[in-house]
């Protein structure tokens, strides 16, 4: 029936954390994976940095290679979803068109934009990558010498500059419950865990 809210049915999906390097994508992806482990939901974390050394080790950083990187990750995610496994992806995926293609390939897809101002990321620079990029030592570095196309309408928006990790995880679980990708008890479970 049209207009009837979709109910949580336990179907697998892909959740893709996008944002600049250092914004907190991997941190939130790992926190979500830990939650799914605690509630016994099958999942697999696909971290962009790790995939770059394996499945996509032959790719560079041209636009074509970046798009192919996203396509391969989306393909792997779809295979996981087809087997009932939730795919958690933490990968920059800088181009909107590639992210849209990933959404179309996966079907059940949640885009999470982890936003943080470039200046804050340069100040944090936990891996020293921004310093090297600004010095010209790293070419085609997203956000400095290569573009990042912000999502127009992400399913979930996280501001890692103004939110604590706990606040971001709580918001993430609440939105996934609201969107019926996770059971409603997920957000309540997290709140109880924080207060324990």
Image (cartoon, rainbow, N blue to C red):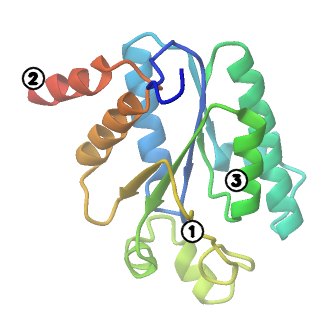
Q: At 27% from the left edge and 27% from the top edge, which residue is drawn?
A: 187
Residue 129 x %, y %: 57, 72
Using a 10 Å C-alpha cutoff, classify the residue at mark 3 as few (fewer than 14 neighbours), some (14 to 19) or many (20 or more). many
Residue 122 to residue 109: above or below: below
Rounded to the nearest angstrom, the CA distance separating label 1 from label 3 is: 11 Å
Residue 96 to residue 185: above or below: below
Disc on the earlier residue, 1 or 3? 3
Q: At 48% from the left edge and 39% from the top edge, which residue is drawn?
A: 29
The residue that mark 2 highlights is 196
Q: At 31% from the left edge and 34% from the top edge, which residue is drawn?
A: 174
Q: Nearer the viewer, residue 66 or 112?
A: 112
Residue 120 to residue 90: above or below: below
The residue that mark 3 highlights is 99
Residue 98 occupies which quadrant of the picture?
bottom right
- In the image, is 7 to the left or to the right of 47? left
The residue that mark 1 highlights is 150
- In the image, is 171 to the left or to the right of 98? left
Residue mark closest to the camera, 2 vs 1:
1
Mark 1 residue element: loop
Residue 91 x %, y %: 63, 51
How many numbered marks does the figure carry? 3
Residue 166 to residue 65: above or below: above
Q: Nearer the viewer, residue 188 or 165?
A: 188
Residue 193 x %, y %: 18, 24
Q: Residue furthest left?
A: 195
Using a 10 Å C-alpha cutoff, classify the residue at mark 1 as few (fewer than 14 neighbours), some (14 to 19) or many (20 or more). some
Quarter of the image for the C terminus: give it.
top left
Rounded to the nearest angstrom, the CA distance separating label 2 from label 1 is: 37 Å
Residue 45 occupies which quadrant of the picture?
top right
Using a 10 Å C-alpha cutoff, classify the residue at mark 2 as few (fewer than 14 neighbours), some (14 to 19) or many (20 or more). few
Rounded to the nearest angstrom, the CA distance separating label 3 from label 2 is: 38 Å
Q: At 81% from the left edge and 35% from the top edge, which residue is drawn?
A: 75
């Amino acid at each position: 029936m049209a207009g009837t809210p979709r109910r949580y049915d336990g179907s697998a999906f892909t959740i893709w954390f996008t944002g600049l390097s250092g914004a907190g994508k991997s941190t939130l992806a790992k926190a979500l994976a830990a939650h799914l482990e605690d509630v016994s939901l099958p999942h697999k974390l696909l971290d962009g940095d790790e995939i770059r050394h394996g499945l996509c080790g032959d790719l560079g950083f041209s636009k074509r290679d970046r798009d192919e990187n996203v396509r391969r990750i989306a393909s792997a995610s779809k295979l996981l979803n087809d087997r009932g496994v939730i795919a958690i992806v933490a990968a920059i995926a800088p181009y909107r068109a590639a992210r849209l293609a990933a959404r179309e390939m996966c079907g059940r897809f949640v885009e999470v934009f982890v936003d943080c101002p470039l200046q804050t990321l340069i100040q944090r620079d936990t891996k020293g990558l921004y310093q090297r990029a600004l010095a010209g030592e790293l070419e085609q570095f997203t956000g400095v010498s290569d573009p990042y196309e912000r999502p127009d309408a992400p399913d979930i928006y996280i501001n890692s500059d103004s939110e604590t990790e706990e606040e971001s995880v709580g918001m993430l679980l609440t939105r996934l419950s609201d969107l019926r990708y996770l059971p409603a008890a997920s957000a309540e479970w997290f709140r109880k865990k924080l207060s324990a």
